[in-house]
Image: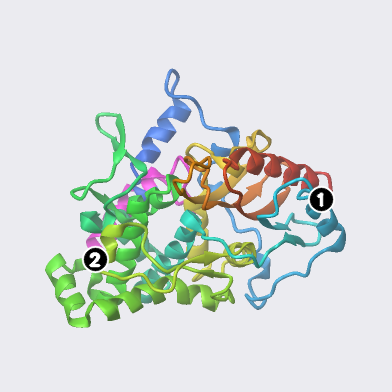
Amino acid sequence: MKFIYLLLTLLMVETVSAYPIDGYHYTFIRRLVNEYRNFNEEGRAVKLKPGAQKMLAEINLNLIDYKDRDMTDFPQVDPAFQKDVSRFFNSLEKDYSISVMDITEGRPVRYAEHRPTSGYQPGSVGKLAVLLGFFTELNNIYGSDWEAKRALLSSKFVWCGKWGIPNSHTVPFYNVTKDKLEKRYVQAGDDFSLYEWLDHMLSVSSNAAASIVWREALYMRIMGADYECAGSSDVKKRMEELGRDSVSIIANNIVNLPLRKLGITKEEWKLGSFFTSGADQYCRPIGGSIGTTRGLMKFLVALEKGHLVDTRSSLEMKDLLYITDRRIRYAASPTLNNAMVYFKSGSLYKCRKDGSPCGKYKGNIDNYMNSIAIVEREDCTTYMVALMSNVLYKNSASEHQALAAKVDRLIEGE
């Protein structure tokens, strides 16, 4: 580790605390080189939205001044704000839930919600629990030594293996030397750095990456300080000693107990299974998954306060959520083009073959579409949203975009 730490330090162009598209020299996430070249060089791919072009030092935590407050502290509903937000749902189907919090500096924090305790299958929004669990385990090994953590994230490459198979999202494979970008499904023989697996999990919502990140958090827990140098045979032996049932319980605790420490109850948010069936060979599902907008909003509040593990880890998690890829669903609203958006979306749909309409994102049994977003406008207006829906037979993406515009106009006008 000492050698890796020195190498990374020497390769740094400048001291930074965040990494959007100019962050390659801090993280060695290779796709960022392509994004930065697209941004800087004439004749390359379509430019990113203006709000996605911010640089390294422009990402900060918005509620850091509140960090000494009890992390379970949550604002009461603001009656006037609540009235305005509730009006959005007068013409929509009933299966919508939302939590909205205006945290613009210089004015009181305001909160409103609609059906905030209704439970939904979180889909890929549940990957945020994996993110927190991973950074919690990283902290258990390296404590407050952020540079040791960063060195590991940048330099440790791990294989996909059976854990990440099958998967349904393509990820970028970028050759820095040849300036060649390919997008394809992850295969068992592919390897990436820990930073890149984290990026794939969040930037393009790769299910394979989510299972790999969760797996590596599990390996950190069972190997402890030996994790960095442990070989596959060492890990395999330890898992066999523990047994599948014990390993499954440990894996479940890794992603759920950190949520409980934030005051998020199991009724508000829990994660029960990995994101790929290949991982089920090693860890059985436990208890199912559920999410609510209030549980997700508690997560966002803790993030902005610096309470996700610690301040530095919280900032890094926020960095990983900053969109420098294609914006979708709620975040795709043109109203947000100039805003910095930190975003995660998830969906899950099921069809029964009874002749009723059904298709991709148009399920007739379940049709979940969920998003969290932190929006930072150029005029310094800042707010957070958790949105969940289960509207059958239709793709709700356009309605989510319309809601994004309405929320933005409401908060902007204050």
Give the amino acid type for the residue marked by disc 2 in the picture. Answer: Gln
Q: Position of residue 148 (x, y in %)?
A: 34, 65
Q: Residues within 10 Å of mark 1 (few under 14, many from 20)?
A: few
| Displayed quadrant of residue 78 | bottom right
Residue hosting label 2: 281
Q: Is 306 included in the stretch rendered in magenta?
A: no
Please rate how many residues cluster around mark 2, counting C-alpha atoms within 10 Å: few if below 14, some from 14 to 19, many from 20: few
Q: Mark 1 = which residue?
A: 87
| SS under mark 2 | helix
Label 1: element kind: helix
The residue most toward the left is 233
Q: Residue at x 77, y 45 (%)?
A: 91
Relative to 195, is 331 above or below? Answer: above
Rounded to the nearest whole Å, what is the CA distance between mark 2 and mark 1?
A: 47 Å
Q: Which mark, by number, is residue 176?
A: none
Tell me which segment is drawn in magenta. 1-25
Task: Point out the tag, 2 or 1, that comes first from the N-terminus.
Answer: 1
> Residue visible at 18% across and 69% down?
230
In the foreground, 194 or 94: 94
Question: Is residue 187 among what the camera can see?
Answer: yes
Q: Position of residue 138 (x, y in %)?
A: 37, 69
